[in-house]
C-alpha cells in the first residue's frame, strides 16, 4: 500500500487533531484508516467520514501524515473539498474550496 501522491481533499488542522484524537481514544486497529466518501447517489448524495479497512476500489492518500482512503468511484466528487471541524454544533463539515 503506497499512498497516492496527488491529494484530492484538504484537511484543516483542527479536523486532523479531532481525527487523531478519535484514533487514539477509540483504539481503532492499525489496519483501519480514515475513510472519506459519499453516501447515496445522484441529487441526494451526502459526504461521509469514518474509519474503515481498505477495499478493492480504494485509493490510499497521505494527507499531513494522516492516512485517508477514498473509493475511486467517489474521487471526482471530492476534488477541491476541505474536511473541517466545528467545535460548536456540527462536528465534521465538508467545504467546497
Image: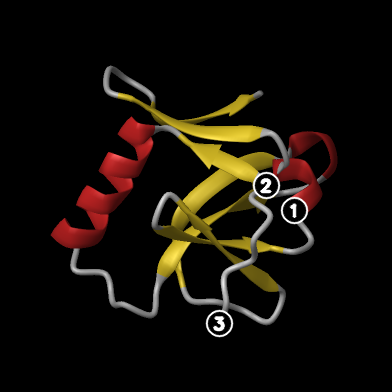
Q: Secondary structure at mark 3?
A: loop
> As drawn, which residue projects farthest toward the right?
42
Q: CA distance from mark 1 to mark 3?
A: 18 Å
Q: Which residue is mark 2?
A: 8
Tell me: residue 74, above or below residue 86.
Answer: below
Name which of mark 2 and mark 1 comes first in the sequence: 2
Mark 3 or 2, nearer chain start: 3
Q: Are marks 2 and 1 in contact (CB under 8 Å)?
A: yes
Which label number is shown at residue 75? 1
Disc on the earlier residue, 1 or 3: 3
**Quarter the C terminus occupies:** top right
Which numbered mark, 2 or 1, is in the foreground of this view? 2
Q: Is the residue marked by circle 3 packed among few (<14), some (14-19), or many (20+) residues within 10 Å?
A: few
Q: Secondary structure at mark 2?
A: loop
Question: From the viewer's perspective, is 43 left or right of 34?
Answer: right
- Name the residue rendered at 75%, 36% in the picture: 44
Q: Which residue is mark 3?
A: 1
Instruction: Using the image as rendered, state which of residue 25 and residue 15 is in the foreground.
Output: 15
Q: Locate residue 61, reporting x and y percent.
A: 57, 61
- Judge depth for marks 1 and 3 and give the one in front: 3
Q: Is residue 80 left or right of residue 27?
A: right
For the residues labelled 3 and 2, say whether their Cβ atoms are less than 8 Å apart: no
Residue 58 drawn above or below residue 74: below
Q: Specify few, some or many for label 1: CA neighbours under 10 Å numbering under 14, 14-19, or 20 or more.
A: some
For mark 2, does the 10 Å Cα neighbourhood hold few (<14), some (14 to 19), or many (20 or more) residues?
some
Q: Residue at x 27, y 41 (%)?
A: 17
User: Where does the image place residue 58, in percent across and percent down from the top left?
Assistant: 66, 71
Which residue is painted at 68% across and 82% down in the image?
Answer: 56
Amino acid at each position: 500500500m503506497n499512498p497516492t501522491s496527488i491529494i484530492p481533499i484538504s484537511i484543516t488542522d483542527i479536523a486532523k487533531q479531532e481525527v487523531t484524537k478519535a484514533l487514539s481514544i477509540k483504539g481503532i486497529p492499525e489496519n483501519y484508516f480514515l475513510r472519506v466518501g459519499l453516501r447515496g447517489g445522484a441529487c441526494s448524495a451526502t459526504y461521509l467520514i469514518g474509519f474503515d479497512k481498505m477495499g478493492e476500489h480504494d485509493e490510499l492518500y497521505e494527507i499531513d501524515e494522516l492516512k485517508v482512503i477514498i473509493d475511486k468511484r467517489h474521487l471526482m466528487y471530492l476534488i477541491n473539498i476541505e474536511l473541517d471541524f466545528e467545535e460548536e454544533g456540527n462536528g465534521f463539515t465538508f467545504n467546497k474550496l
